[in-house]
Structure formats: structure tokens, C-alpha cells
DNA sequence: TTGCTCCTCACGTCACGTGAGGTGGC
DNA sequence: TTGCTCCTCACGTCACGTGAGGTGGC
């Protein structure tokens, strides 16, 4: 019969662990002195403790181990728990592999671009979104900018209209004759079409939800936004993603001055993991 | 300018996260109303938060991220942290792969042996250990048992002698003419040789430390112990280890009766990972 | 005036590590 | 009698989630 210290030495665990397992009822000493509180363990118990330690090594929680040992679980249930745990660990393995790839990509980015900062890309699900917009082909980008301003003025200020929105419907990024959709997000569902001065109509439609949207935030004028699209594409291929749809951009903050250095835009690119 | 709720929605994080990051000084709102305590975030800040979220994804702690952002760290230091983190994750990957192998081995054991329990094997480092022992060739196992009893009686009871100890010096497990070392562990270093009745001497020597010792606890008479050696060997090969030295056994509890059903023995087998 | 958002505590998480402060056996 | 071990609190960990209870703006 052994004291905590002796038993801890035998089992290569800490005394605290033995007291803790006693406290939570997972592993009780064979005998405890009611007067002094001293715990006494038997040699037989070492086998039991070892079983607990092995199950812990497998990644099971102490609560799971408790139910395995004290509630009589069947062989099938045991197998179920082990298979479940195995699946969990395999998911973790995939996550960590992804993490390693991301770190490598970032290391590369740090080395490449000592001057400018590496790109921060967030993958997130984006819900379906109502927009009020107009789609047409613009000869030049200035035409598109003029339209953007016209739309802004056509909307009554602060009447429940959301961020500015732009979506490119060309397969490639062009410099002229671009097929663009311009408008704004709608926080609420019910909205009537809005007419512009030139007779064109903004119409309401719903952007589909995207499960894995690669997003990044850029600050600056159009050239910066333009560069952002390219950066995002390169980031995707470096990090194991493939573009899979039309990118969007959302104006989080409108430019206050002509040079648009304080224009803030979130670029969103639907992607899929390469698997 | 956005409230917590709005900014949280934009960034796809919880309000609690934003308040927490404020509390620990990692990410403060651009402006806070001193009277009401209301937090106000700017569009510019979304880029900063995204950087934090990306670094978190990489596996860095909030404290590390804090120092990355607020203490001006050099490119080299940044690379150092990333490389360190990468090495950490790769170690974790190895650990989890091992865990998966262990789970698979245990699943197999559960399927194979529906009747008896799977073996619980603990890998632990064992320190160098002084022993008082005698090594000789025994014709039969009964001879060895007699010697074990003789040694027990030659030792003054409770005078600082430890557990009974047995080590097999044959390369294979034999049934006859076994080269065995029998004795006991010595908790303290200083001990004189002990003479037996037949004139033989128990001598003091030091067992070397073993870094990775596969150990298991068995309860029962000799046949059970014998089987344990075999089980331990099979376990090792199933779990990616290779035996690499002489096994030892330690008597944690002596048998009280002739059938020895309550004899408790720890079998120790030095192993090395197959890598 | 009624919801909605905002705020600040404060507890819970998981498996112990690490003292603090005090008592019993050789 | 002096160390050594034992005991029971109780705080800290890491990054928030989850209410509780109360206040300010449309």
C-alpha cells in the first residue's frame, strides 16, 4: 500500500494529478483515512491508472474516460468513441497542415516584399445579400465612376441604404468596355426600384451566398483596388484555393477627397479549396 | 464609424471578441465615449483587425500578436517567430499522427480480443537505478523461484530494500537454462553486498537509465507475466517501436498465496521509436 | 413608450501547476 | 526535536461564450 508520493513516483505522474483525479471521482485511492485525509493506493490500482493514462494519451477527455470506466460501455460504444476521436484528430491534422502552408506562404511574402506589408486575407462565409443595382457595359472606368456618383445622388441619404457595391461580370479584368454592376447593399429586403435622372432603373436582386469567400481590405484609390484583385488571386493559388466566381467589392468608406487615399474597400473573391 | 455590433458583423467576429481585445489592449476602438463607454470603430480598423485574425489563424497567441503589432519587430524577428511556430505545429503533427496510430492499434485490439481487455502500455523514461542482485543460469524456473525466496529471506525486513527485481539476460525467452538476474531495487546508493546461506553473494550494480521504456502492469502468476512479455513485444511493433535491450520485471506486490493470483508485476521493455 | 443595442461585471471552460499555510509520523 | 510528507484551499492558465442586471438612443 502506497502514499500519494510513492504512488506518484511509481506511475510517473504528479501528486497533484492523483489528488485531482480523486477530487473529480475519476480515480479514487483504495483507502482514505477519514481522520487525517491521507490517501492510500494499492498496487492493483497502478493498472487502472495506467489504463486512464493510455486513454488520455489517445486524446479522450477525463469525462469520457470516466464514463468508459464507470458506466459499463459496450465494445461497440467503445469502438464508436475511438472512431469519433480518430475522425476528430484527422480533421485537426488537416487544419494543421493548412496552417503550415499558410505560414510558409506568409514567410515567402515577408521575404519577397520587404517593403510593403504582406496581404491579410480572411476566408469567411458570406450570406445571401439583397442589392439595388444596375448592370451595363462602360466604355471607360471614368464612366463607371460617374455612374457611381449618379447612383449615390439618386438615393435619398440615410434611408436604409447600405454600402456601395461593385461587381465585375467579365471573365477577365479589362481596361475598356467593362461589364460592371454598380449599386449598393440593401439591409432590408423590401425595396422598390429607383429611377435615375437619365431614365435608367436600379433594380433589386439577390446576390447568392458564398461559403468560402476570400476577402481582403484595401485602402486607397482605384489602382490600389485593381492591384488588390491580382494580389488576392495570387494569394489563393499560394494557399491552396481556386477562384470560382465573380469577385465583388464593397465600399466601406467613401473617399473624402479627390485623390481617394482614404477610400476603403473590401474585395471579395469566391474560392474553393483545391482539396 | 461603426458601433461594436456593426463592426462585429462586418468582420464576422463576436462583440465579445472586440470588447475582449479592447480589454487586453490588443485592438482598441478608434474612439470611445468617456461618458457612456460606447466603442466606435473606423473602417480603417478593419484592415488591422483582419491582420490580427490572420496571425491568430497561423496559431500565434494574442500576446505574440500584440508584440508583433505594437513593439516594432524587425523582419528577421517576424521570420523567427513564424519559423518557430511552424516547427511547433510540425511537432504537433507528428504527435497527432502517433495518436492516430495508437487509436488504430487499440481499435484492432478491441476487435481481436472481445474477451480479454486490451493491453495498457505506458512509455516513460526510467532513471538509472541501483540494484542488489545475483546473476546465474537456472536449469528450471522453479530453481529461480527458490532463489527469489532465498534472497527475500536473506534481506533484513524493511531495512530500505525496495521492490523485487528480475532481468532476463538471454536474447530469446527460453524455457530451460535461463540466464537470469534476480534481486531487489535499492532506494539508496550505499549498500554492502549481502551473503546468502549457500555462500553466494548478492552484489550491488547500477541499471542504466532508459529514455523510452515501454511498461505494462500485469496481475497473476508466472504464466501471465510470461504472456505479458509477448504482448508487450506485439504492442511495440503495432505502435511503431522496436525492442532495444533486455526487459526487466519489478514485483510491486508479492503473492500472498500459492496460486499467486494477486502477484502484481510491472514489465519494462526498453524500446526505440522506428522513426 | 417600446424594443434594440450598448455597457460592465462575473462565472465557466479543461486539466492540472504552483504556492500558501498548516498538521502528522520518524 | 527537526525535516519530510501529507493535507486543504485558492489563484492562474487561454480566449473568449454566456448570461445577469442595468442604461441610452430611435
Image: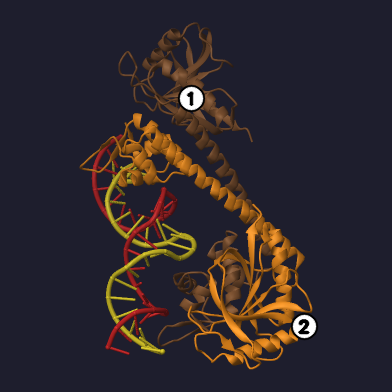
Chain colours: A brown, B orange, C yellow, D red
Q: Nearer the viewer, residue B221 or B247?
A: B247
Q: Nearer the viewer, residue B46 or A231?
A: A231
Residue B12 shows in the view: no
Q: Is residue B182 left or right of residue B48?
A: right
Q: Mark 1 — on which chain does it sit?
A: A
Q: Position of residue B163 (x, y in %)?
A: 57, 81
In the structure shown, which secondary structural element does the residue marked by tag 2 occupy?
loop
* Left or right of A146 in this view: B242: right
For label 1, the residue is A131
Question: Which chain is disc 2 placed on?
Answer: B
Query: Which corner quadrant holds the C terminus of chain A?
Result: top right
Q: Mark number for residue B26? A: none
C-alpha distance separating marks 2 and 1: 92 Å
Instruction: Let me know if residue B84 appears in the view.
Output: yes
Q: Position of residue B19 (x, y in %)?
A: 34, 45
Question: Quick one: label 1, few (<14), some, or many (20+) residues within 10 Å?
Answer: many
Residue A223: x %, y % from top left: 42, 15
Q: Nearer the viewer, mark 2 or mark 1?
A: 2
Q: Where is residue A82 drawn, in percent x and y?
A: 65, 59
Query: In the figure, A275 relative to B196: above or below?
Result: above
**Residue for point 53% across, 31% down:** A213
The residue at the far right in this view is B176
Q: Nearer the viewer, residue B253 or B43?
A: B253
- Relative vertical location of residue B4 with respect to residue A50 in this rendering, above or below: above
For numbered disc 1, what is the local secondary structure?
strand
> Mark 2, residues whose alpha carbon is within 10 Å: few (<14), some, or many (≥20)?
few
**Residue that mark 2 sits on:** B139
Amino acid at each position: 500500500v502506497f502514499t500519494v508520493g510513492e504512488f506518484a513516483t511509481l506511475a510517473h505522474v504528479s501528486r497533484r494529478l492523483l489528488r485531482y483525479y480523486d477530487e473529480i471521482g475519476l480515480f479514487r485511492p483504495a483507502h482514505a483515512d477519514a481522520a487525517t485525509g491521507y490517501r492510500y493506493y494499492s498496487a492493483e490500482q497502478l493498472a487502472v491508472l495506467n489504463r486512464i493514462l493510455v486513454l488520455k494519451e489517445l486524446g479522450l477527455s477525463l469525462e469520457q474516460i470516466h464514463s468508459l470506466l464507470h458506466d459499463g460501455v459496450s465494445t461497440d460504444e467503445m469502438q464508436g468513441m475511438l472512431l469519433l476521436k480518430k475522425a476528430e484528430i484527422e480533421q485537426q491534422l488537416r487544419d494543421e497542415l493548412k496552417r503550415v502552408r499558410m505560414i510558409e506562404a506568409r514567410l515567402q511574402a515577408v521575404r519577397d516584399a520587404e517593403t510593403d506589408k504582406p496581404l491579410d486575407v480572411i476566408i469567411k462565409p458570406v450570406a445571401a445579400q439583397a442589392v439595388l443595382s444596375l448592370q451595363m457595359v462602360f466604355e471607360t472606368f471614368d464612366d463607371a465612376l460617374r455612374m457611381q456618383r449618379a447612383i449615390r445622388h439618386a438615393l435619398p441619404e440615410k434611408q436604409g441604404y447600405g454600402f456601395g457595391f461593385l461587381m465585375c461580370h467579365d471573365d477577365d479584368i479589362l481596361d475598356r468596355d467593362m461589364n460592371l454592376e454598380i449599386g449598393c447593399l440593401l439591409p432590408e429586403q423590401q425595396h422598390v426600384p429607383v429611377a435615375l435622372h437619365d431614365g435608367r432603373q436600379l433594380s433589386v436582386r439577390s446576390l447568392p451566398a458564398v461559403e468560402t469567400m476570400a476577402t481582403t481590405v484595401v485602402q486607397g484609390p482605384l489602382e490600389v483596388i485593381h492591384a488588390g484583385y491580382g494580389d488576392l488571386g495570387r494569394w489563393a493559388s499560394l494557399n491552396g484555393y481556386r477562384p470560382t466566381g465573380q469577385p465583388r467589392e464593397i465600399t466601406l468608406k467613401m473617399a473624402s477627397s479627390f485623390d481617394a487615399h482614404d477610400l476603403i474597400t473590401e474585395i471579395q473573391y469566391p474560392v474553393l479549396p483545391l482539396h
